[in-house]
Amino acid sequence: MLERLERLPTDPILGLMGLYRADTDPRKVDLGVGVYRNDLGETPILGAVRRAEQVVLSRQATKSYVAPAGNAGFNQAMAKLVLGDGHPALVADRVRSIQAPGGCGALRLGAEVFRAAQPDTVVHVSTPTWANHIPLLSGCGLKLERYPYYDAASGGVKFDEMLGTLDRLPARSVVLLHASCHNPTGADLSEAQWRELLGVFKRRSLAPFIDIAYQGLGSGVAEDAYGIRLFCAELPEVAVAMSCSKNFGLYRERTGCLHIISESPTAGDAVLSHLVRIARSIYSMPPDHGAAIVNEILTDATFREEWSEELGAMRKRIAGLRAEAVKQLAKACPQRDFGFIARQQGMFSFLGVTTPQVHALREQHHVYMTDDSRMNVAGLRADNIEYFAKAVAQVLRT
Ligand code: LMR
């Protein structure tokens, strides 16, 4: 029976990892998959993670199951990380959390629970959105629609168009928002825009589903969660999917969680009962190791301090690379304005070149980015940024 299946194209993001690895040119530049890199092009294990991991391993006495919703300490620490200590939703006991296999697992659990509540739910995603949002959310049968978001002319957000579209949606439509460090564009909403958006969600009774995969890599831990904190304080129901891949560097440990903020503790308990049932039917329980490490870091003052410093250094490096990329691109391609790269934040920006130009960058200059010209700014280095800018200048001339 399985011989009926035809071979599928490789994943647009993960497929690039293989192509990059196979390239033997020493000048190669990896701006593909969204993985943080230091100035040596490496993705080292964070010091706080290494040390917390030792504590976790030395204390661990069993490999028996933890619990259907995962590590309770981790879930609680993650809720506090995203909402901030003393957030009104925490005080009112309106938050229910489930550990998930990475941010992807959290997104899928959220989609599944919306479907359980309302099978004909439509999820509205930004144009563009992270490529994997589409299969993650539609894979359980939900219908997807799009709302305007990125303004290629300015490198910012088409906020009025976005607002206008959302303001026409039927009640109970789910709207997927990126909390910060928008993937793939790097164009984020300002605090004033989040406040205006809140008015539309209230007026239209929309259901926000907020993805936060880069907390701390944009403007700061609290700043990057501004919209989530606002929405969870003001709206009866919010879903928040978190990932620890980038800000804790735990990629392969598949560490994330989903929080549902409900109108009441009883409503929250009901949602959580569905979430654990859904998880049980897919993978039973989440992997433990990454969550145990994050729990250790977030609940130990010394580890937490070390992690905050390391996260701050990553954030600073990315902002510095953005400024330097603008400088080098201005020198190499003075006819074109790339200033938007420094106004955006997080790991990604659209370079704004055509797919054939992306292919020319890859084939002629060994510079790797996705076909839509999304580049992972963190893949640039002091010793390749000028090479990158000159390569861009060359493909723009052809
Ligand atoms: C990315 O957007 O490149 C990362 O989030 C990695 C992935 O899984 O796509």
Image: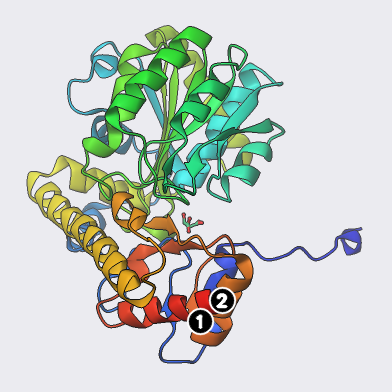
- Between residues 181 and 36, which one lies in front from this camera angle? 181
Identify the residue at the far bottom of this view.
25
SS under mark 1:
helix
Question: Which residue sits at x=55%, y=86%?
Answer: 364
Residue 290 pos. (x, y %):
35, 52
Vertical arrangement, residue 372 with respect to residue 201, above or below: below
Vertical arrangement, residue 343 with respect to residue 144, above or below: below
Q: Which amino acid does label 2 sit on?
A: Gly
Quickly name the residue at label 1.
21
Question: Which residue sits at x=42%, y=56%?
Answer: 349
Q: How dense is the environment of label 2, judged by Cα within 10 Å: few (below 14), some, or many (20 and up)?
A: few
Vertical arrangement, residue 145 with respect to residue 11, above or below: above
Residue 339 pos. (x, y %):
32, 57
How has the structure been colored for display? Answer: rainbow
Could you tell whether 42 is left or right of 251 in the image?
A: left
Q: In which quarter of the image is residue 57?
A: bottom left
Q: Distance between the residues labelled 2 and 1?
A: 5 Å
User: Which corner quadrant holds the N terminus?
Assistant: bottom right
- Between residues 109 and 148, which one lies in front from this camera angle? 148
Q: Which amino acid does label 1 sit on?
A: Arg
- Between residues 257 and 190, which one lies in front from this camera angle? 190
Residue 357 pos. (x, y %):
58, 72
Question: Which residue sits at x=47%, y=35%?
Answer: 158
SS under mark 2:
helix
In the rendered structure, are the residues bearing label 2 and label 1 in contact, judged by CB atoms less than 8 Å apart? yes
Quickly name the residue at label 2.
18
Q: Is mark 1 within 8 Å of ligand 1?
A: no
Residue 273 pos. (x, y %):
51, 21
Evaluate whether residue 286 shows in this view.
no
